Amino acid sequence: MERKPMLAVREALDLMLAVARPVQDIEVISTLAANGRVLAKAQVSAMNVPGADNTQMDGYAVRAADCAGGHASLTVSQRIPAGHVGQPLLPGTAARIFTGAMIPEGADAVVMQEQCELAGNVVTIKHAPNSGEWIRRAGEDITSGSVVLPAGARLRSQELGLAASVGLAELPVKRKLKVAVFFTGDELTMPGEPLAPGAIYNSNRFTLRALLENLGCEITDFGIVPDSLEATRSVLRESAQGHDLIITSGGVSVGEEDHIKPAVEAEGKLNMWQIAVKPGKPLAFGEVQQAFFIGLPGNPVSSFITFMMFVRPFVLRLQGVEGAIAPRAFPMRADFDWPKADKRNEFLRARINDAGGVELFRNQSSGVLTSTVWGDGVIDNPPGQAIAAGDLVRFIPFNELLY
């Protein structure tokens, strides 16, 4: 039988995103509890921010015309802390004012205190201010009736602060994505247990769970599944119940003990298998009952890389995130040689050095998890591309991929 060509990275990701079904259920939660959630409906401000003209500085509120000569002595008529409303400012007077306080009626400028000298209740203004100097205008940040947060926004600290600034105590968000995970391999052992000959510790369980937690998923962990077709099918059926997505690690290659592919084909359908990516070629994508399925490779770096490049954007779409979800890549100078081009799209573990270039980890094997801790990110190297020192490469920092 003729083997189908491997899918390109972009082609594979487009296929996955095209069939993603965002969750529809909405819940209203406290804004304080909404970090990392996805906004279900656009939020409109019912107020201006700032609500009134206010001062950017500690100083004196004045009429600019009273200080036009650059040296004026004015009677201090009042003191206005933030949160208090002053009296109208009479000509020939100044108001002591503090950062954030409302500008009194009649004043049109603020002179910072460093340009003033106070003696008793008379302040000498040693500056000729322009009208509007050091004044924040009402609504210059947000105007009443404007959309402050669009539907589909993933809520970070910045978005929560913005919501709070317009008085939004609660926010409508999509429910959390429900993800089932399990891990195949008779060789897998949990840390804390004796390590038998030929066994390895199950690092992928810790890596993948943490990656899903970073994305705000609700996780059900079915643990380590024995290397048998029937056991794999049984857990697939169970994990499909009540979950939006199933993620597995291991067993997606073509060996006699690799049961994920036939199990998914028996219990559901496999839409995609094998991608032209290094590390991580044997990635599987399909559906089991109503749940999507993604089978990741067992090698720890392969699992880590394919999660970031394929699972993360797919999860974001399922969560209802709209707009751009691709990580940003930055052109960086290669401070290394990579003379042997590969036919697959490579993701090379690298870090930024003190000279402003990027350097590679010494061992790019798919089993060397140390490279993911040592590195700051990955170099997205196209198929067939050799790299010489001094070339510009596409560098994707881990902070673009992990959250």
Image (cartoon, grey):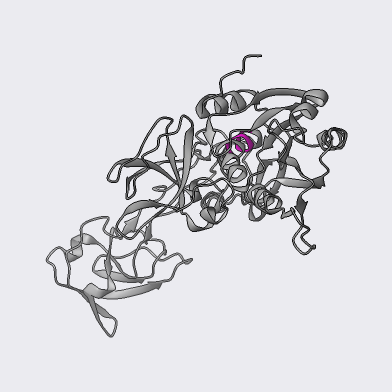
The stretch of residues the image draws in magenta is 312-317
Q: Seen in the image, is 202 located left or right of residue 98? A: right
Helix, strand or loop for the magenta stretch, by majority: helix
Residue 237 vertical placement versus 303 (above, below) = above
Q: Assess whether residue 316 is covered by the magenta stretch.
A: yes
Classify 355 as above or below 349. Answer: below
Q: Position of residue 108 (x, y in %)?
A: 28, 58
Residue for point 55% across, 56% down = 370
Q: Which x, y percent locates residue 345?
A: 47, 33
Q: Position of residue 225 (x, y in %)?
A: 82, 44
Q: Nearer the viewer, residue 346 or 200?
A: 200
Q: Position of residue 387 (x, y in %)?
A: 34, 40
Quarter of the picture containing the N terminus is top right
Horizontal placement of 65 versus 190: left or right? Answer: left
> What is the quadrant of residue 275 in the picture?
top right
Looking at the image, which residue is at 64% across and 37% down?
A: 315
Q: In this view, which residue lies farthest toward the bottom? A: 120
The residue under the point 61% across, 18% down is 3
User: Which residue extends farthest front?
Assistant: 197
Q: Residue at x 51, y 46 (%)?
A: 47
Query: Vertical placement of 165 versus 21: above or below?
Result: below
Q: Report if residue 19 lies within the magenta region.
A: no
Q: Nearer the viewer, residue 95 or 228?
A: 228
